[in-house]
Image: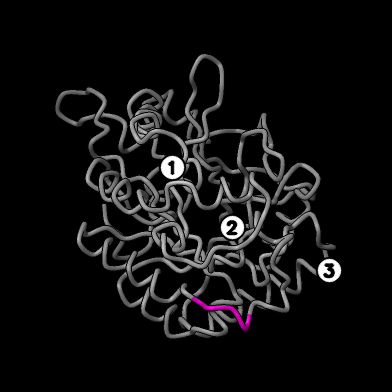
Amino acid sequence: MDVSESARRGNAPWQRNHVSGQPETASVRNALTVDVEDYFHVAALAPNIHRDSWPSRESRVVGNTHRLLEIFEQFDVRGTFFVLGWVAERHPQLVRDIAARGHEIACHGFSHRLVYEQSPEEFHEETLRAKNLLEDITGSAIAGYRAASYSIVRESLWALDILVELGFVYDSSIFPVRHDRYGIPNAERAPHRMSTPAGRSIVEWPLSTAKILGFRLPVAGGGYFRLLPYGLTRWGLASINRRERRPFIFYLHPWEIDPGQPRVSAGWLSRFRHYTNLEECEGRLRRLLGAFQFGTARDGLAQIGLLPREDGAAD
């Protein structure tokens, strides 16, 4: 049974107040996620930043991620950190610090190459490399995966079979919107268990969209969180909890709370997407953390019955 069917039958554990029988969205634990990458890894800036220059550029990912950890600690929330293998290889202590604070470590691939620009063999090799690295650092199995720039699209759904083969139990790479670089516009919006092209099974938590006048409004975070008015984003996220009676998934990057990051010469659209409202993002994030309940992606999927609950997981 997928989450939509469970909600219709009233079986979701967060859907009904046990005393009054009324919807109880205050107890919905949404997924707070961070894509741990540096400002120079971003796909929008890739045409202007050669990969060979990455090691020589000023890295700010450690300081920015620690800043996020401090903010999350202040609000007593735990989240899922999808760590880029390139970052983990150079900053293994950062990965340990994240895990030591009770957050879930998940995989963001290794090189931040778009999935549909890789062959299946390349994707298998680099994803296995990143997964093994993160498991060696943490000493724990890595369950979740998120593709660079949500690049599992209709033409690269083959990647899901490789994820299953490598032992991932859930994915959060499909954005059910239309975009010039990613997206499957008619994809399922709610978390669900889906069949892969080869007939295997994996849990998918698509990035959050709200329904407004028949339009799918992307409210999952990132650039949308900075570009859209905060009130509109908050309304969209609340509507997922209250009207659709399910949790949402939210994401951001460490560089999005860093208005002092080095500026890269790029086209106007890339500059607009990357730099707009960086100075407002931390304040908006704090407002959001005070308005909703959050937890890890794995706990959120367990909450709605798509994954088994881990021992010691919060109710």
Residue 117 covered by magenta stretch: no
Is tag 1's residue or tag 2's residue first in the polypeptide sequence?
A: 2
- Specify the principal SS of the magenta part: loop
Dot 1 amino acid type: Phe
Is tag 1's residue or tag 3's residue first in the polypeptide sequence?
A: 3
Task: Report helix, strand or loop for mark 1.
Answer: helix
Residue 57 covered by magenta stretch: yes
Task: Report helix, strand or loop for mark 3.
Answer: helix
Q: Where in the figure is residue 247, as x and y percent of width and height?
A: 39, 39
The span shown in magenta is 55-59
Residue at point 31%, 60% (across, down)? 78
Is 158 placed above or below 123 here? above
Residue hosting label 2:
146
The residue most toward the left is 19
Residue at point 36%, 79% (across, down)? 97
Residue at point 48%, 19% (across, down)? 212
Residue hosting label 1:
225
Which label lies toward us, 1 or 3?
1
Asked whether, in this view, residue 236 is left or right of residue 37, the answer is left
Task: Report helix, strand or loop for mark 2.
Answer: loop
Q: Which quarter of the figure has residue 181?
A: top right
Is 51 placed above or below 169 here? below
